[in-house]
């Protein structure tokens, strides 16, 4: 008897090569195969009349074979099968290349169903390489593919394995199933693979989405309520706060208070600090580092790039150094002898705060007593990284900062295991960035404004979607714009920056711009997480329709950091409805959270996802996003279960525990 845990090779026709191909789809067992969800369903229930067909559409056609012949053609396409079919409305052609194996498939007078994209050849409708069958196939699932496996093979294999669905144990509580009129897991799997009506697909998806969200939220809550024991940090941050030359905003004060309460607790802090560019997240993080050091421990600050790490190092040395706190830096550009000296100071406790990139997680970096880790934006900083950090110290407190506002609806999925502080106001005196959207016709006006700002002492970014010109994509490239601006403004210093440049070259270009030696920096989105250049006051985004709202908001945040009035110019290469709508949102709002919500509405979670590691594919998250209406239901149930059984040890919760461990990794609660 076949079982869900059996290898996929127990199926007839699945040998080592097929198993290797299936593995690329994440399918190794019969259970994996049954859980391979269709990406779509083709409706092959109703055939269209030939006379109703329109070139370019995909359709099901039923016809009687009028004639068929196999002809040899002089090309790599080998032999061609040409079939003519008719219904009571018209004739049409069916064509297959490399088709010797089809020579007996289309006998004259046979009724056959063909499914494919309708084309036109010499004035007559045709289907090129359609799928075919000898009867109605209903609603047919369409699966993700990889080299070596076709749709029909997957359908055949799932049909052979579907009897095992009854052995799969769902993890939803019975009251949740009955209250929401959900099918059993076995029934949902049968309905998703072999639906009779569109309603079957809807019912199946609802059950599977409930299951996914319930497991996801239970795991996140387990991490949240089973925090590691940390070290209480009872020193005060008041000396640091009172020493500032300005007063914190109300939002900053609330964040400082949240973090202080976490650090004074015996549980490990695991907090996300959200706030727009320029909202003052770093000073809040500095108060936490001050508290950690005054409590006798060390702090680490991780930045996304080497050059940004150096900039943070300079600021921390200035802000914390005056209190006798020793700040060190580990940089990729340091000599090995310098690195060794810094590593020794860190190991022996002579360095209180260390600044660097993710290299701080590597072997060989040892702390005397690590008590706090601050991680700057844009890191894929998930469970495995936190486990590594736990090994660097005794469960150090963790503070993750992000300048990408996460919509509330998405944050409950991506950061459900973390406490969240939001800085939703900017420091007083910051000038609003004037944002305008223009078409190509206004380019001369944009360039005149650019020249005027630079000649008055300012600096400018020009961001392009491509590195170099492409025949396949109609958009302006960084290389092309760099050449254009260099010729147009020979009296100005124009530099080029993109991701394919060597690291040393990128650092030199960024340093030149930061130090004011470059007037105009033409770049790709590599500067999205860049450096703080207060003198930069113009941001031009070319082909803005090729950027998401969240990304444009991040780019706009590169300017407006100094006393100059700053501008953001969005150059539209397309006037499509969605492009115009996105430009309208940007010109009307500078509220990062509102922009993030609109980005989610217009583009889905792709722009936001990637800031987190979860074990879920982006496409799976996308599916969950569209069912957030049931999030509260599953979350409430997960909370109730974990209050009674925090480790999910009770017999009725073992299936849930197994599902959570399968998603997040075994023994995750112990490792966290």
Image: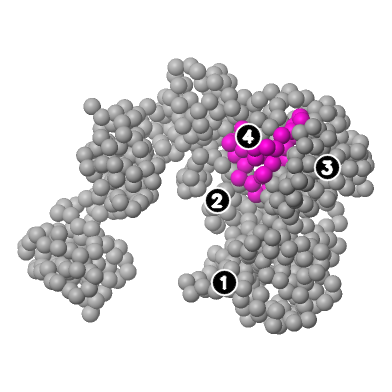
Residue where numbered disc 1 is placed: 468
Query: How packed is label 4: few (under 14 Cα within 10 Å), some, or many (20 or more)?
Result: some
Give the mark nearest the N terminus, 4 or 1.
4
In this rendering, the count of numbered labels is: 4
Q: How far apart are marks 3 and 1 (CA)?
A: 41 Å
Whether pointer 4 and pointer 2 mark residues with C-beta atoms closer than 8 Å, the reply is no
Residue where numbered disc 2 is placed: 605
Q: In this view, does 109 lie to the left or right of 183?
A: left
Residue range (magenta): 358-387
Which quadrant is the N terminus positioned in?
top left
Q: Which element type, helix, strand or loop, lies under badge 2?
A: helix
Residue where numbered disc 3 is placed: 327
Q: Which element type, helix, strand or loop, lies under badge 4?
A: helix
Asked whether 640 falls inside the magenta stretch, the response is no
Q: Which residue is at 48% across, 45% downward?
A: 617
Q: Which residue is at 21% across, 67% downward?
A: 97
Q: Which of 377 and 253 is in front in this view?
A: 377
Which quadrant is the C terminus positioned in?
top right
Q: Quadrant of residue 75?
A: bottom left
Check residue 62 in the rendering and tell me which mark sits there, or answer none.
none
Query: How packed is label 3: few (under 14 Cα within 10 Å), some, or many (20 or more)?
Result: many
Q: Distance between the residues labelled 4 and 3?
A: 22 Å
Residue where numbered disc 4 is placed: 388
Whether pointer 4 and pointer 3 mark residues with C-beta atoms closer than 8 Å, the reply is no
Image coords of residue 332 (percent x, y): 70, 51
Select label 3 or label 2 by which is in front: 3
Q: Distance between the residues labelled 4 and 2?
A: 28 Å
Give the mark nearest the N terminus, 4 or 3.
3
Give the mark nearest the N terminus, 3 or 2.
3
């Amino acid at each position: 008897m076949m079982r869900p845990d059996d290898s996929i090779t127990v199926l007839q026709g699945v040998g080592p090569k097929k198993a290797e191909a299936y593995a690329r789809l994440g399918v190794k067992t019969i259970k994996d195969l049954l859980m391979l969800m269709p990406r779509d369903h083709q409706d092959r229930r109703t055939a269209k009349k030939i006379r109703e067909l329109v070139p370019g559409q995909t359709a099901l056609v039923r016809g009687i074979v009028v004639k068929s012949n196999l002809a040899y053609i002089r090309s790599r396409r080998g032999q061609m099968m040409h079939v003519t079919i008719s219904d009571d409305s018209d004739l049409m052609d069916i064509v297959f290349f490399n088709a010797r194996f089809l020579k007996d498939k289309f006998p004259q007078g046979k009724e056959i169903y063909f499914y494919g994209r309708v084309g036109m050849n010499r004035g007559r409708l045709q289907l090129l390489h359609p799928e075919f069958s000898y009867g109605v196939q209903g609603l047919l699932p369409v699966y993700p593919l990889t080299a070596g496996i076709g749709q029909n093979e997957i359908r055949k294999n799932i049909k052979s394995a579907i009897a095992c669905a009854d052995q799969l144990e769902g993890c939803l509580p019975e009251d949740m199933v009955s209250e929401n009129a959900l099918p059993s897991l076995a029934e949902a799997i049968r309905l998703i693979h072999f639906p009779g009506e569109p309603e079957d697909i809807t019912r199946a998806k609802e059950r599977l989405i409930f299951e996914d969200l319930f497991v996801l939220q239970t795991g996140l809550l387990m991490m949240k309520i089973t925090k590691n024991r940390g070290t209480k940090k009872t020193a005060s941050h008041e000396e640091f706060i009172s020493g500032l030359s300005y007063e914190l905003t109300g939002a900053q004060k609330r964040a400082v208070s949240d973090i202080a309460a976490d650090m004074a607790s015996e549980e490990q802090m695991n907090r996300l600090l959200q706030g727009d560019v320029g909202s003052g997240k770093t000073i809040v993080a500095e108060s936490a580092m001050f508290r950690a050091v005054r409590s006798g421990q060390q702090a680490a600050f991780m930045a996304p790039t080497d050059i940004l790490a150096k900039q943070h190092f300079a600021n921390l040395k200035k802000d914390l150094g005056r209190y006798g706190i020793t700040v060190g830096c580990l940089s990729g550009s340091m000599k090995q002898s310098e690195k060794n000296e810094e590593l020794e100071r860190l190991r022996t406790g002579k360095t209180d705060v260390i600044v660097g990139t993710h290299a701080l997680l590597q072997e060989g970096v040892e702390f005397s007593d690590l008590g706090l880790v601050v991680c700057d934006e844009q890191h894929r900083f998930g469970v495995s990284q936190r486990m590594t950090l736990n090994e660097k110290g005794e469960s150090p407190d963790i503070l993750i900062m992000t300048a990408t506002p996460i919509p509330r609806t998405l944050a409950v999925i991506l950061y459900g295991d973390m406490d969240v502080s939001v800085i939703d106001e900017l420091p007083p005196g910051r000038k609003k960035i004037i944002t305008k959207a223009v078409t190509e016709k206004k380019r001369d006006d944009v360039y005149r404004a650019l020249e005027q700002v630079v000649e008055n002492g300012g600096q400018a970014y020009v961001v392009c979607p491509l590195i170099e010109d492409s025949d396949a994509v109609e958009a302006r490239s960084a290389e092309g714009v760099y050449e254009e601006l260099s010729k147009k403004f020979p009296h100005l210093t124009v530099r080029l920056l993109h991701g394919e440049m060597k690291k040393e070259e990128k650092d030199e270009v960024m340093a030149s711009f930061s130090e004011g030696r470059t007037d105009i920096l033409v770049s790709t989105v590599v500067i999205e997480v860049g450096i703080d250049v207060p003198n930069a006051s113009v941001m031009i985004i070319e082909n803005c329709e090729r950027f998401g709202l969240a990304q444009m908001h991040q780019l706009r945040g590169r300017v407006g950091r100094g006393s100059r009035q700053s501008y953001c110019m969005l150059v539209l290469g397309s006037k499509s409805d969605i492009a115009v709508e996105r430009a309208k949102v940007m010109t009307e709002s500078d509220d990062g959270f509102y922009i993030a919500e609109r980005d989610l509405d217009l583009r889905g979670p792709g722009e936001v996802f990637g800031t987190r590691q979860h074990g879920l594919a982006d496409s799976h998250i996308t599916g969950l996003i569209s069912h957030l209406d049931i999030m509260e239901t599953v979350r409430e149930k997960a909370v109730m279960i974990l209050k009674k059984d925090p480790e999910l040890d009770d017999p009725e919760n073992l299936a849930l525990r197994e599902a959570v461990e399968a998603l997040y990794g075994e023994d995750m609660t112990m490792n966290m």
